[in-house]
Amino acid sequence: MIDSTARCPNWLAGRINDQGGAISFYQYMDWVLNDPDHGVYSTGRLQIGRNGDFCTSPSLSNDFGFLLSNQVVEWLFQLEKASKNNQILSLVEIGPGEGSLSRDLINNIAEIAPYLIPKMELVLVELNEGMKSRQEKVVKSLKDIKIRWTDLDELKKNPVRGVIIAHEVLDAFPVERLIFRKNNVFRQGVALQKENNENYLEFIDLKTTISIDRFISESKSLLGIDFPPRGICDGWTTEWHCDVLPWFNDLSKALIDGPLLIVDYAMESNRYYSKRREDGTLISYRGQKANSNLLKDPGKCDLTSHLCMEATISYAIRNKWRFLGETRQGQALLALGLSELLYSLQNIAKNDIATALDRRESLLRLVSPMGLGEFRWLAFQKVNNSDL
């Protein structure tokens, strides 16, 4: 039966028809998020913030950047101490969103360690022109620091020393969806169906690829669990972040020395690949509302999937990254001074209680175990040949 909510826009129907009437879910996700003319990211259609499609930690207030800057400054100090001939230090943000986190970090670094700013550059790695134009408006107020936009290919040609931050980036990488039916595994696809001259989308089963078969064969050593788990239902579906492994390889070539911080949705493999999680972790967001219908309004909704911790760490280690540790965002921000920041709000309350209450709410949302506080922070250090 056709799902009447899964209408296919003409641009996407044309693409799928050109591919023979069916594509992989991976291709579908890539197009609806990143197509230059129609993707929700590349067109800048996606709105981030309290009144947008979804909130991120930096979009709530500049307090997130203030707290994170304490860690970034510590890393920069370490790099500057080890640097030779006044080498430039780069603060690199992958997928900078609206640009608010980069802006807040630079502003706070200027307050904490102003002498670092002339020795630094801000590097924004952004593929989508729609988002880049919005970032330009946000960071244009920054003074006394070089700002440039680039891509990973260019960074690989001219690697930098510094700190790399990937905040809510990997969750939006296109994923392969795997379906298990009666002891067989299939690659999920998306196909066109026509009814009354209207195009609709539906899921179909496709043959697996060599890469998917390799992932499954390596799953026990990679994930540390049985995969698929025992006792799954017929049609149990999950995801594989196939682009994360090459991404770590690209980053290792783009950075000479320094740490990498990933902040994202993530969970341990036994939770990620639980038999009870029969539809995986993928979810659609639009207008602050989550929807499990991944085929509704393609090109107008964000699609996001959690990371598997063990797989992510393993992929990093394979590509010359040393794993430094991980923690939940709530714990990380408390360690970086959130309690003191909350306490300081009592001084504001005397003059402007509304502002104080608003900031307090934002800070508590950053650490709430029911929300942003469950984000995972994963830290890595680039391994140089001298460290081997």
Image (cartoon, grey):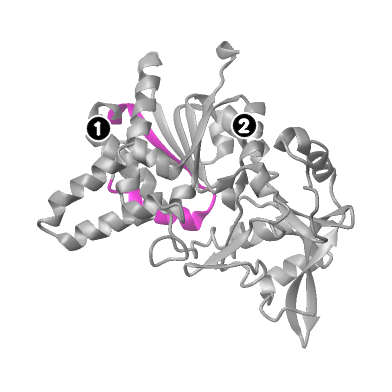
Whole-percent x and y of residue 55? 43, 59
Q: Secondary structure at mark 2?
A: helix
Sequence-first disc among 1 and 2: 1
Q: Which of the image's four quarters has the N terminus?
A: bottom right
Residue 68 appears in view: no
Relative to 136, is 379 on the left or the right?
right
Is 268 drawn above or below residue 57 in the view shown? above
For image coordinates 57% across by 46% down, the residue present is 266
Say which of 351 and 102 sits in front: 351
Q: Is residue 70 visible?
A: yes
Report the quarter where the C terminus lies: top right
- The answer to whether 91 is drawn above or below residue 227 in the figure is above
Q: Along the horizontal axis of the image, is 365 left or right of 227?
A: left
- State whether residue 184 is above or below residue 329: below
Specify start and end residues of the magenta stretch as a single range.
Answer: 117-141
At a point 24% along the width and 32% down the height, the residue shown is 112
- Residue 210, image quadrant: top right
Q: Check disc 2 and report the residue beneath it.
A: 316
Provide residue 176's location: percent of width, then percent of height. 73, 52
Residue drawn at (51%, 48%), measured in percent from left and top? 168
Q: Position of residue 75 (x, y in %)?
A: 39, 26
Q: Residue furthest front?
A: 231
Helix, strand, or loop for circle 1? Answer: helix
Q: Mark 2 is on which residue type?
A: Ala
Q: Which residue is mark 1?
A: 112
Residue 117, compared with residue 96, is above or below; it is above
Dot 1, how many residues are within 10 Å of its Cα: few (below 14), some (14-19), or many (20+)?
some
Which residue occupies the foreground of this view, 171 or 337? 337
Q: Position of residue 20 (x, y in %)?
A: 84, 65
